[in-house]
Image (spheres, rainbow, N blue to C red):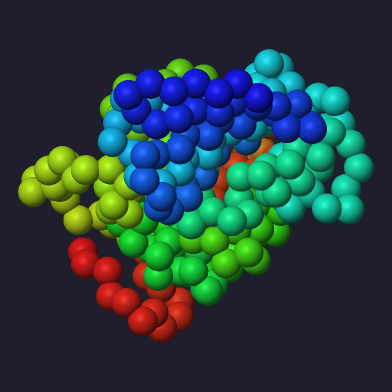
Amino acid sequence: MVVTSSDGPTQERGALPSGVTITTLHGHRPGPIVSLLGGVHGDEDEGVLAVLRILDELRTSELTGTIRAVATASPVAWAARSRVNPLDGENLARCFPGTGGEGPTPQLAADITRNLITGADLLIDLHSAGMRYRMPLVCGFVDSVEAADRSRRAAETFGTPLIWAHTDPSPGRSLSVAAELGVPAIYAECSGGGGIRHDELDTYVSGVLAVLADLHMLPNTRHTGDRKEPRWVYGCGDLDVGMQAKRDGLFASTVDAGDIVNVGDEIGRCYDYQGHLLEVVRAPRPGMVMFLRRQARTLAEDVLFVLADLTSRQEYSWHPKG
């Protein structure tokens, strides 16, 4: 464990048993514990850089409370630029809380659950669409759990133009284990593709700092007068249950991530490797295109797109504006 201090918070850095590094910043006064997670998928650099920038800014801040940060969360997958860990083929975002699993990825999940999520007052998990997909800039949370009100407030404070309220936590995710532990949690997604858009990166950094200010962990110097009300969408949000390709081939998208479609609207077309049209892929219901396949080469059963609902399918105790 390395301990450093300056005029700002005290910093500790150390390796967990699984080999992942955790950084902890202790403010000069006690307060909430906020946990930051980046790089759960190894092909998503946005969250890693955002967490590093946030830690750098906080080192000279008047921080109250504690920040716990892990980025990268899956170091071997990150080194391989892979969504899954090449050592065992497992997706870290499907392995939480890590208990009962074998191999390095469940061990990572158990370490992160024990040392980062457990005991936190808020979890912020920063993702992106990765190499294979496109997504609009969005902040999401689970609305059907004990800590939903605090998660919703954090999602609104984060400041993305789009908020995705999920009806249920999908199993194996950081947010699902947070829900089980009663920890408020939000996540963010952005366009992906292997590059980093500076406007999206700035939204991640400013979003986390705004949430910390809202929790009275930082001085509130953020001006929100010109900020637009977010658009709300609803539904599952599980990439694993999206519309799948029927055969191997090449996928050419017609719409873009964030587009609103109606029943029967064309999403894209699938071709075989001789250039013959296999299928026109259409929307099965109205919604907003959230995950949209970016990578053209597609295997049978690869997910092509995921829709979010434009209206809630259940009664909510709150009424979002817009």
Would you place residue 186 above or below residue 218 in this image? below
Quadrant assignment for the C terminus: bottom left
- In which quarter of the view is residue 106 placed? top right
Give me the residue at 37% from left, 39% from top. Answer: 28
Q: Tell which of 119 and 71 is nearer to you.
A: 119
Image coordinates of residue 17 in percent, x first then y, are 79, 32
Tell me what residue is drawn at x 53 percent, y 39 percent. 68
Name the image quarter holding residue 164: bottom left
Q: Which of 142 and 6 is in front in this view?
A: 6
Q: Quadrant of residue 80?
A: top right
The furthest residue to the left: 225
Residue at (84%, 33%) from the top-left corner? 104
Total numbered labels: 0
Q: In x, y percent, where is residue 36?
A: 50, 40
Q: Where is residue 6 in the image (x, y as percent from the top left)?
A: 38, 21
The spot of residue 19 in percent (x, y) is 75, 26
Near-viewer residue (280 or 211): 211
Q: Relative to 101, does residue 297 appear above or below in the rendering? A: above
Residue depicted at x 39% and y 31%: 9
Q: Quadrant of the N terminus?
A: top right
Q: Can residue 314 be seen in this view?
A: yes
- Asked whether 179 or 11 is in front, the reply is 11
* Residue 73 left/right relative to 218: right
